Image (tube, helix red, strand yellow):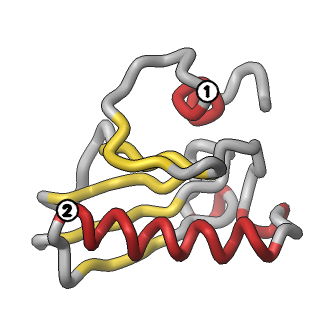
C-alpha cells in the first residue's frame, strides 16, 4: 500500500465509496468523473503504480475476470476497456486501474 494513494485507501476501506463489485484481490467502483453513462474502475487491492509494474500473471487474469463478472452482474453487454499507462498516456492516479466505459 502506498500511504498517499487514493485508490489504496478506497481498496482498503479507508475512504468510503460504494463498491460495485469486489474479489479477494480487486475492487470495482464508479469513477468520480465519469466519461460515459457507465464508467467503472477496476483496481487491484495491492499497489502497482502502472501496468508495467505488475509481474503477477494470476492477478492480471483476475483483473480480466473481474471485468467479465462485473459487466455480467450489471447487465452491460457492450463496453470499452481502457488502461492509461504512464503520465504521457494520460495516467493521473498512479495505481493501476482499468476503466470500463459503457452505454455511450
**For the residue carrying disc 2, how many other residues have a C-alpha within 10 Å: few (<14), some (14-19), or many (20+)?**
few
Which mark is drawn over residue 78? none
Tell me the quarter of the picture where residue 37 sits: bottom left
**Position above or below: 8 against 49:** above
SS for callout 1: loop
Total numbered labels: 2
Image quadrant assignment for residue 68: bottom left
In percent of width and height, residue 77 lies at: 19, 82
Question: Residue visible at 73% across and 58% down?
Answer: 50
| Residue pointed to by mark 1 | 12
Rendered residue at 65%/50% (across/down):
25
Callout 2: SS:
helix
Residue placed furthest toward the bottom:
78
Label 2, label 1: how far apart the Cα atoms are: 23 Å
Judged from this view, the residue extending furthest toward the right is 55
Residue visible at 36% across and 26% down in the picture: 17
Is 18 on the left or on the right of 6, as rendered?
left
Q: Nearer the viewer, residue 67 or 8?
A: 67
Residue at horizontal 75 percent and vertical 50 percent from the top:
49
Tell me residue 96's x, y (percent).
Answer: 65, 55
Where is mark 2, residue-wise? 74
Tell which circle, 2 or 1, labels the residue nearer the N-terminal end.
1
Amino acid at each position: 500500500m502506498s500511504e498517499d494513494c487514493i485508490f489504496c485507501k478506497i481498496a482498503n476501506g479507508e475512504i468510503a465509496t460504494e463498491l460495485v463489485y469486489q474479489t479477494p484481490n480487486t475492487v470495482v467502483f464508479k469513477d468520480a468523473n465519469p466519461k460515459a453513462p457507465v464508467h467503472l474502475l477496476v483496481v487491484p487491492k495491492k499497489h502497482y503504480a502502472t501496468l508495467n509494474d505488475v509481474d503477477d500473471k494470476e492477478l492480471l487474469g483476475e483483473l480480466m475476470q473481474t471485468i467479465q463478472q462485473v459487466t455480467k452482474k450489471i447487465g452491460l453487454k457492450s463496453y470499452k476497456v481502457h488502461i492509461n499507462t504512464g503520465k504521457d498516456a494520460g495516467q493521473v492516479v498512479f495505481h493501476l486501474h482499468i476503466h470500463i466505459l459503457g452505454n455511450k
